[in-house]
Image: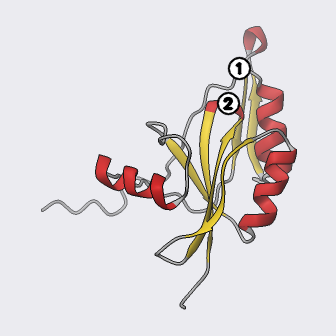
Amino acid sequence: MTDATGRVRQLRLVVRAEDYDEAVRFYRDVLGMPEEESYAGEGGAQVMILDAGRATLELSNPAQVDMIDRVEGSSRPSARLRVAFEVEDAVGTTASLVQAGAELIAEPVETPWRSLNSRLEAPAGLQVTLFEELGPA
């Protein structure tokens, strides 16, 4: 057994955004992810690093992914990579993101593990789950 504490200091999901300005507006301005850093380079190169709070890497086998799709009421299967954001108000945030241009895949629904989850297709080609932890029953 290897002691892995301290090896990984940050998880950064790098997304190629064909419409960079729209992605910045959606994730920073509407979803509310604070800007940590941004840089511009040669040839119009741009990057912005947004704070997503605590990051985790969720590894799920196909049966688990299929079960989550059913629980969340998704009308289409999960993308190979799906980004999940914990929010304080899943219903309100879902409505804000749809108004800002996200495509609603599934309305917020209470899951068996006591969270309120919705599914959206968001800018930069990301399939997104919003989840609100509801606490004990």
User: Which residue in the structure is indicated by mark 2?
Assistant: 124
Residue drawn at point x = 44 percent, y = 57 percent: 68
Label 1 sits on residue? 18
The x, y position of residue 70, in whole percent, is 46, 56
Q: Dot 1 surroundings within 10 Å: few (below 14), some, or many (20 or more)?
A: few
Q: What is the residue that sits farthest to the top in this orientation?
A: 43
Q: Are marks 1 and 2 in contact (CB under 8 Å)?
A: yes
Q: Which color scheme does this rendered protein use?
A: secondary structure
Residue 94 as seen in the image, left or right of residue 83: right
Image height of 132 relative to 10, above or below? below
Q: Secondary structure at mark 1?
A: loop
Residue at point 31%, 46% (across, down): 62
Image side of residue 91 versus residue 61, left or right: right
Q: Amino acid at mark 1?
A: Glu
Dot 2 crowding, Cα within 10 Å, few <14, some 14–19, many 20+: some
| Figure check: 49 above or below 10 | above
- First along the sequence among labels 1 and 2: 1
As measured in the structure, the alpha-carbon distance from the residue carrying label 1 to the one carrying label 2 is 7 Å
Q: How many marks?
A: 2
| Amino acid at circle 2 | Ala
Q: Determine whether, in the image, residue 47 is placed left or right of residue 82.
A: right
Q: Height in image: 103 above or below 40?
A: below
Q: Position of residue 38 (x, y in %)?
A: 76, 36
